[in-house]
Amino acid sequence: MRFALPEREAPASLPPDMRDALAASRADRGAFGEPLYFYASLGSTNDAAARLAEAGASEGTTVVANEQTSGRGRSGRAWFSAPGAGLYVSVVIRPGGATSAPGGHFRKMGSDPNLQNLPTGMAVLTLAAAVALATAVRDATGLQAQIKWPNDLLCGRRKLAGILAEASTRGAGLDAIVLGFGINVRTVGYPPDLADRATSIEAELGRPVDRGLVFALALARLAAAREALGRGETAAVLEQWRRLAPSSVGRAVSWQGLAGERRGTTAGIDADGALLVDAGGVRERIIAGDVIWR
């Protein structure tokens, strides 16, 4: 089957460090990274992977870019994707099977009322992805990255990586998920609005790291997390998430409720991945939206 590659962009050769690390990790990655499309420059890896998924691409199909010109994070925010400074990756996941016929329609998670009926599976998948990426960074570099709900990696209070899941529906069902992630690897000059909020692995460690190894381990840990969820080991994955997310308990936060701003203290997550917050003697359950960490 010929998949629909992004228009106006042409795949490039995978850099040697990434190519060699992928080859060495083949037995641990399962389908993840097979096939793989690498671009020197791309608007958005999620958009490219979504087009491939709509054309029937199999689970594990991966899109990687050396830079993104229109990278995005949650709530449509731009993701700073400087050339060669990070890992910008999207992977196709098929909840109902490894392959699908062409024809799914992609929508951003939560942007359609029907997708609100699908939060559990997607929420748990993004939490599992956060565990996988935090573990990959720790194993590849020794940097003790932590998770902030629902799916950011932090060092201290600076953002190191983010995850964006987008869903494709077929009829009333979920056909595919594109799981995108960006990891800041190399030291780079951030725009003024990000300078005090973003960091990178090399900036934190003060030394170079093997980008290819981080990439290969990220795919391998994602494959392992996917397999664990497939075996029904959701509780174990969530427990791993809790260990890697100390701010999910005891941190002051605020968020917008139906009656305006609400404030409380984090009290962990539930079995569906929702953030629990104690506010004025009431335990609130937050499944979406912006949470400000105080």
Image: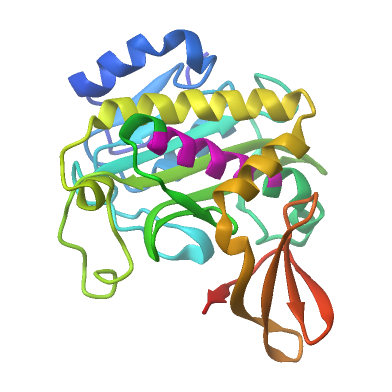
* In the image, residue 131 lies in the stretch drawn in magenta: yes
Q: Position of residue 145 (x, y in %)?
A: 42, 48
Which x, y percent locates residue 17?
21, 22
Residue closest to the eye, 286 or 245: 245
Q: Quadrant of residue 137?
A: top left
Image coordinates for residue 10, horizontal then vertical, percent: 26, 30
Magenta span: helix, strand or loop, mainly? Answer: helix
Relative to 52, 22 lies left or right: left
Say if 12 sits above or below 69 in the image. above
Residue 222 against residue 46 in the figure, above or below: above
Residue drawn at the location 28% of the way across and 39% of the way down: 8
* Residue 177 appears in the picture as rendered: yes
Is residue 10 visible in the rendered image? The answer is no
The residue shown at (21%, 52%) is 203
Q: Position of residue 149 (x, y in %)?
A: 59, 59
Q: Residue at x 54, y 30 (%)?
A: 222
Displayed quadrant of residue 59 = top right
Instruction: Give the extent of the magenta segment.
Output: 124-138
Please tell me which residue is depicted at 66% across the width and 23% down the height of the picture. 227
> Quadrant of residue 245 in the image?
bottom right
Q: How is the image coloured?
A: rainbow
Would residue 252 be counted in the magenta stretch? no
Q: In this figure, what is the number of numbered marks?
A: 0
In the image, 252: left or right of 272?
left
Residue 74 or 281: which is nearer the viewer? 281
